[in-house]
Image (spheres, coloured by chain):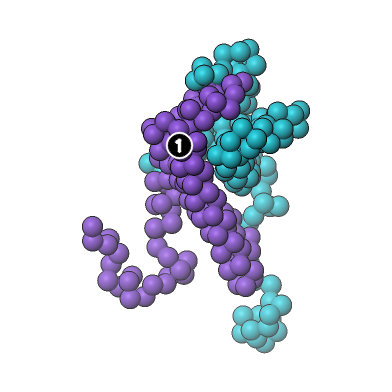
Chain colours: A purple, B cyan
């Protein structure tokens, strides 16, 4: 799919906010995706509460459940990084500290997302 | 001239500021907005606990046990209840935000009413989830 960015925006790369509406839009898209995924997550957690390790593994090893859990985890972490970026932008005004925190948030959410997906693959192989 | 700080360019100039937290009278719409941020950040920790749970389960029975040793304690359950309420609030208030983004519910009294409603419903939802589990209705995926 071709980019929806205007040529002018591409050349400039920066505005007062250093970006356009992309961040806002991604935050909304991920939140819309998280509505059904959160409901599924609640259904899954309530269905597993009070059970044992065998039940948890066999539930998460099922492809559909593994895919939905991976989607819930990864999209949640992405949504988290978008949200925390706004908080950092609002409250941290020192460029160096701001850059450090923004990189730290991205580093943590990417590491955690990969860990979740890798864990789900290992569970499927248990 | 000293009477016109903008012209001196001195770093200590007192420029007019937009009103913020300490200026406004507290009201439910601003409280809900702040709570949305706080629950969002809190759910970041919750997401890390989710990652910890998945990694623990992937480590087999001992790994699962090591997670449950922490989770199945009074403090662990209290923290899980906190995450349950935070997710309930962020979920419901997030829908409120999406409705605003589509142009619905922006009227002042409507926004205040839905704000209060979100607080009440989030507590009911979180208590409902724990009541559902404690009355033995959970575990249906066995």
Q: In the shown orientation, is residue A15 left or right of residue A92? A: left
Q: Position of residue B32 (x, y in %)?
A: 60, 39
Q: In the shown orientation, is residue B129 left or right of residue A37? A: right
Q: Nearer the viewer, residue B93 or A109?
A: A109
Q: Nearer the viewer, residue A58 or A110?
A: A58
Relative to B47, residue A8 above or below: below
Which residue does the numbered mark 1 point to in the structure image?
A124
Rendered residue at 53%/59% (across/down): A106
Count how many numbered circles sit on residues in the image. 1
Rendered residue at 59%/16% (across/down): B132
Q: Nearer the viewer, residue A60 or B3?
A: A60
* Secondary-structure class at tag 1: helix
Rendered residue at 67%/42% (across/down): B26
Q: Position of residue A5 (x, y in %)?
A: 30, 64
Rendered residue at 43%/70% (across/down): A15
Chain where mark 1 sits:
A
Q: Quadrant of residue A86?
A: bottom right
Q: Quadrant of residue B3?
A: bottom right
Q: Position of residue A85 (x, y in %)?
A: 54, 57
Q: Is residue A78 visible?
A: yes
Residue most toward the left?
A1
Q: Quadrant of residue B127?
A: top right
Residue most toward the right?
B74
Q: Position of residue A44 (x, y in %)?
A: 50, 27
Q: Is residue B121 visible?
A: no
Mark 1 surroundings: few (<14), some (14-19) or many (≥20) residues within 10 A: some
Q: Which image quadrant: the N terminus of chain B? A: bottom right
Relative to A104, residue A109 above or below: above
């Amino acid at each position: 799919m071709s980019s929806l960015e205007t040529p002018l925006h591409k050349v400039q790369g920066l505005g007062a906010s250093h970006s356009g509406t992309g961040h806002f839009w991604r935050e909304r898209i991920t939140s819309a995706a998280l509505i059904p995924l959160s409901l599924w997550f609640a259904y899954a957690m309530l269905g597993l509460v009070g059970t044992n390790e065998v039940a948890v593994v066999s539930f998460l090893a099922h492809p559909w459940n593994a895919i939905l859990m991976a989607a819930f985890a990864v999209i949640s972490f992405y949504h988290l990084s978008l949200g925390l970026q706004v908080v950092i932008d609002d409250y941290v005004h020192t460029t160096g500290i701001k850059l450090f925190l923004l990189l730290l948030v991205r580093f943590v959410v990417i590491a955690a997302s990969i860990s979740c997906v890798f864990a789900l693959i290992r569970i499927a192989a248990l | 001239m000293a009477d016109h700080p903008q012209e001196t360019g001195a770093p200590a100039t007192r420029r007019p500021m937009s009103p913020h937290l300490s200026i406004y009278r507290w009201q439910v719409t601003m409280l809900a907005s702040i709570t949305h941020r706080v629950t969002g950040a809190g759910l970041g920790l919750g997401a890390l606990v989710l990652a910890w749970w998945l990694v623990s389960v992937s480590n087999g029975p001992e790994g699962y046990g090591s997670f449950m040793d922490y989770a199945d304690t009074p403090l662990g359950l209290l923290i899980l209840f906190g995450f349950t309420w935070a997710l309930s609030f962020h979920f419901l208030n997030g829908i409120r935000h999406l409705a605003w983004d589509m142009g619905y519910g922006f009227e002042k009294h409507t926004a205040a009413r839905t704000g209060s409603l979100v607080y009440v419903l989030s507590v009911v939802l979180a208590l409902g989830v724990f009541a559902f589990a404690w009355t033995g209705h959970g575990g249906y995926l066995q």
